[in-house]
Image: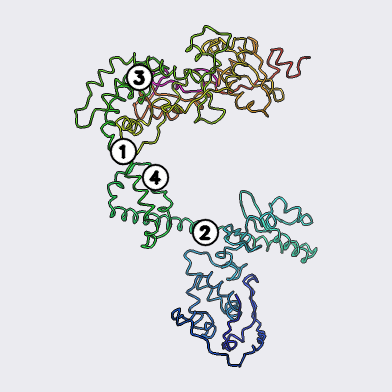
Amino acid sequence: MSGESSSAVGRPRRSARLRGKAGLCDENSGPQALTAPSAEPSPKRRKVNTARSPPKKNVLKEKGKRTCRRTLSMLPDMPLDILFEIFGHLHPLDILHLARTTKALRNVLMQRSAVSIWKQARKQIEDLPDCPPDLSEPQYARLLFDPHCHFCLTARVMTVLWACRARCCKSCMSEHVTESSSLYNLMSDFKKLPISKMVPMEFRNKPIFLKRDALALREQITAVGDDKEKLEEFGKTKVEEVQAIETHARAVAAWQDEQAERRGFELETIRYNRMRSIMSKLSELGYQVDLEKMSEDFKVEFEDHPLVKQPKELTARIWNNIREPMLAYMERVRADRLARERCQHMCLRIIFVKQLLDIFSLVCPPRTYLPSTADFCVMPEFKRSLMVPPEEPPPRGELLDAFACILELCARWRGETSARLLPLLPPPPGSAPGAAPLSRLGLATTFFRCKRCPAGWNAIGYPRVLAHECLTVRAAIDTGAATPEAHLHNALALTVGEQPWNRAGDRVAWHEEAHHAARRIVRAVGADPERATWEELDALDARVVCTACMHGDCVRVMTWRTAVKHALRSHSGAAAPKAKWVKLNEGDTEQVQDEEAEVVEAELEILGDWACMRCRSQRMKYDELMVHLIDDHTIDNPEEDEDYTLHLDSSTGPGEPMLEQHMPVSELTTPKVRRAAGLLPL
């Protein structure tokens, strides 16, 4: 901003006191502010056109009366004691801005006699550490509050290197800041001095410093000369100065953290008050019941709503701007509430069904594939009772009658669900003309792809696909539900968080890549890909090595299941190398199995998915399962296969290793493996 404020005639009157103080000072010039007065050059006289111009129409009267613009042009004419009193009540950053408006104000505020203004303004900042001796008050104010980079003047820079006394943007970091390890390269001529303690260091994961500080130190040491005593005295003094700087830097950094925490609390309070004000407005418009009965999901969404979660006080103008979007949102909340209320009577009945199913699961053998609660509830035997209108008595007797044939219902569900998978399979190969359709599901080369699981982890065999949780995971409730069946599915989503197995038929597909990978692995272990089943491969319990992934003198040894996962993760895509499989001989297989036995239990506890046998809970990690058994079933010493078991949706079977085993080639005797490692001639 210009230091001049001119009128239509000429330069305004200046205070004689301020015109006498024309010495310029800079907030970057250090504690020694300039005090020597100098004559301010008088401005050139402006020429004024004295010719009378023809009168113009008063346009302002047509547009309305125009108010005079208020400026600071008269401020320098005020007495100094009044100016000092006014400025002392300002924020230090405001004083800094004032010092940059006019030369006259700058001359006043940058004089040493004006230090009381800066101190009084600084003391208004709560808990702020005092100005350090190595900075002037304007420098300290700039470092604290001016959000511009000290090197390129980029705005909104929040990174402050307190020990370096600089605010630095990201682009200037690489140019002006360097790591402490490079300090000795810059000061290689002064190795006898404690150089690392003579330069202020900032810690940002590692010690850093300003290059200019190191160069300035180099000049200072050079100026001292070769006198050993003077160098030692200089080094001692410099170390004390740096220690004082770093101590103050830690104090002001702690103050900054406290201010940020306090500001965060203030913003959170403003957000909370805004949310309460919006809720009050919505209650006045008839949405109080919807707010009180809002679901947990909608509560979280409401609190995080971009129009609600703003650190701004709700004013009448703001409410008028956000009123329509918030009303539209509340209509969604109301639709959700009504949908939940319409199926409330079904929710109570579904809970009763789940309690009966939990009892039934206690008598089932471990690792039995059962329908989910949602699958039971959509069976006609249960569905009729669940959809009885709420005004009629609860149909508990009919639900108990349905459980009389529960074993037949489970078998029927397995057959119908398996039949739904058959259309996903490719046409049967000509080498197995008489095979029954359902028998193809049990082949070791049959893999399905879950569309919700990440690539490389989505290959699922049969019958595991019947228990895969992604296929029964809860769908969002239908707020437009208008039929009893739609209300039933909403009730299932609300009570058990489930939907019937692959209800829409769009969550599972044929996994072509896993199928071909499994064919190569089955062939490598000596089995027939067209006939070998999962049970036969598990009974064979062979171990294979991928010779394409040999690193040094180690190889990766895998079960056939782990080998399929390895092929999908390491050899998937056109650019990936093709997997090469070699089956280990019996001696090597026994050796690997002995080593696996030492780690397989720990692997399963850490990586495996487990299920509680006391209730129909979802899969859990081992630690989570132990807490569940203690808290929900008061079982302090649970036993495997009695209280818990490996989940049917686990990617491996009981007692099988989940990870690849790394073995030194020198410990293996299989010729093909040793030949691939170069230990035998080709």
Foreground residue among 55 and 269:
55
Q: Are marks 1 and 4 in contact (CB under 8 Å)?
A: no
Q: Residues within 10 Å of mark 3 (few under 14, many from 20)?
A: some
> Residue 403, image x and y in percent?
29, 17
Which of discs 3 and 1 lies nearer the camera? The answer is 1
Span colored in magenta:
637-657
Residue type beneath disc 3: Ser
Residue type beneath disc 2: Gln
> Residue 153, image x and y in percent?
63, 64
Return the residue at label 3.
361
Which of discs 2 and 3 lies nearer the camera? The answer is 3
Which of discs 2 and 4 lies nearer the camera? The answer is 4
N-terminal label among 2 and 4:
2
Question: Could you give the CA–CA distance between mark 3 and mark 1, rounded to whole angstroms?
Answer: 31 Å
Q: Which mark is residue 339?
A: 1
Return the residue at label 2.
256
- Membership of 84 in magenta stretch: no
Q: Residue at x 47, y 21 (%)?
A: 465
Question: Could you give the CA–CA distance between mark 2 and mark 3, rounded to whole angstroms?
Answer: 59 Å
Q: Residues within 10 Å of mark 1 (few under 14, many from 20)?
A: many
